[in-house]
Image: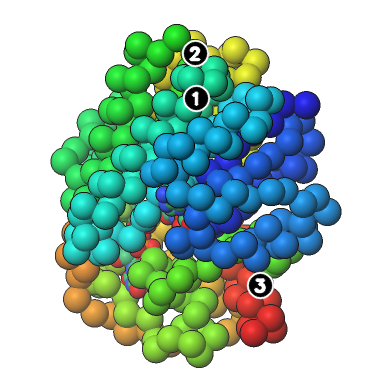
Amino acid sequence: MSTILVTGGCGYIGSHTIIELLNQGLHDVISIDNLVNSSEKTIDRIEAITGKRIVNYSIDLCDLAATQAIFEHHPDLTGVIHFAALKAVGESVAEPLKYYHNNFESLINILKCCEAFAVKDVIFSSSCTVYGSIDQLPVTENSPVSRAESPYGNTKLVGEEILRDFIRISKNVQAIALRYFNPVGAHPTGLNGELPANKPNNLVPFITQSAAGLLPPLTVFGGDYDTRDGSCIRDYIHVCDIAEAHVMAMDYLGNGKNTDAYEVFNLGSGEGVTVFEAVQAFEKAAGMKLKYMVGDRRPGDVMAIYSDSSKAEKYLGWKAKASIHDMMASAWKWQQHLMQEA
Ligand code: NAD
Ligand code: UFG
């Protein structure tokens, strides 16, 4: 059986993708994660859900020699799903060099190793942040990218360019960049989910922690946008749908179905949801009222963005299945699990 390396496998999206890969049963899986934003407890959670235990190598991907040693140790590697990155937008503004160093160096080292060890298939985690503020909705892969709002966003924009330039000259490697919209939710068992190391800035973990009494009431950032209810519109997508897309993208590359050595796909539900609608969906899923207030706009927020993901449907055979209700219900189940665990 071939082996897939998942970098950032102890993190939020990486761990859900490992669960999908193990459930599919076509590959062995290993993880590299230095636990800078996660914990090795995730490996236990993956085992609780799948019944399978995988190995995580706790090394820094910026260390080329250590990364090479893992590739040497696993001659059966055929693909890498590269999730590992730092991702806090605000921190990246405060510490740009930390973000450029970590996110570029780790990507470059992965690509060097894939070339040297002829590991053919690479999937890169990108983001809808590459589109910036855009008027033409929904966004397709042909929509123009724009200057990044933050160093984090820039690591995705330039990361895609690094990948494209490298694939153009690579003898051994082909790649896909997947542009995620807003991944939220947790595994339907409630046994694995997002675990922000610090106070969450993202909407859904803030809602669940606030509802659990761990944080003050939610502030809706701006109620005066030119949208149907005045709040911002986003394309929320269940993390398990995102995970499934990675498995399908790996199969697509592995079976040689790709038309180009480097391709880009949007991963979104295609549905724009306002912040107030997200709050209502949470209230319905959790069966409780959420305290919130409407505050100022958050600097850097785009008013509205949602995806046209028909390219992923056409080529990968992938389509988002979960509803916003499913996303909120699973996120709340995970929050309750965490509270029982504590
Ligand atoms: P996460 O922080 O939960 O997972 C990333 C993992 O990578 C962490 O466990 C961290 O410890 C590890 N890591 C970071 N730098 C490393 C290094 N140098 N060496 C080894 N391990 C390292 O983040 P996530 O939400 O699972 O995101 C996964 C990927 O998807 C990231 O590249 C992120 O930028 C991208 N992405 C995330 C979102 C989102 O909203 N969550 C949206 C778009 C794109
Ligand atoms: N929001 C609130 N209150 C909060 C948190 C968020 O009203 O406490 C609103 C935001 O204003 C936004 C929506 O909820 O309208 C979603 O916000 P998130 O922070 O969850 O997600 P963003 O779309 O702002 O951020 C995403 C990714 C980032 C990426 C960014 C760039 O999470 O990684 O898009 O566009 F950099």
Q: Is residue 294 above or below residue 32?
A: below
- The residue located at (58%, 14%) in the rendering is 257
State the CA–CA distance, disc 2 to disc 3. Answer: 43 Å
Are the two marked residues, 1 and 2, in contact with CB atoms closer than 8 angstroms? yes
Which kind of residue does numbered mark 2 sit on? Asn
Q: Is residue 323 shown left or right of residue 63?
A: right
Q: Nearer the viewer, mark 3 or mark 1?
A: 1
The answer to whether one can see residue 72 in this image is yes
* Label disc, if present, on residue 172 of the rendered structure: 2
Q: Which of disc 2 and disc 1 is earlier in sequence?
A: 1
- On the image, the x and y values in percent for residue 248 come to 62, 30
All told, the count of numbered labels is 3
Are the two marked residues, 2 and 3, in contact with CB atoms closer than 8 angstroms? no
The local secondary structure at tag 1 comes to helix
State the CA–CA distance, disc 1 to disc 2. Answer: 8 Å
**Residue that badge 1 annotates:** 114
Which kind of residue does numbered mark 1 sit on? Cys
* Label disc, if present, on residue 299 of the rendered structure: none
**Residue that badge 3 annotates:** 333
Q: Which of disc 1 and disc 3 is earlier in sequence?
A: 1
The answer to whether one can see residue 251 in this image is no
Q: Is residue 339 above or below residue 57?
A: below
Q: State the residue in front, 151 or 95.
A: 95
- On the image, the x and y values in percent for residue 61 come to 44, 44
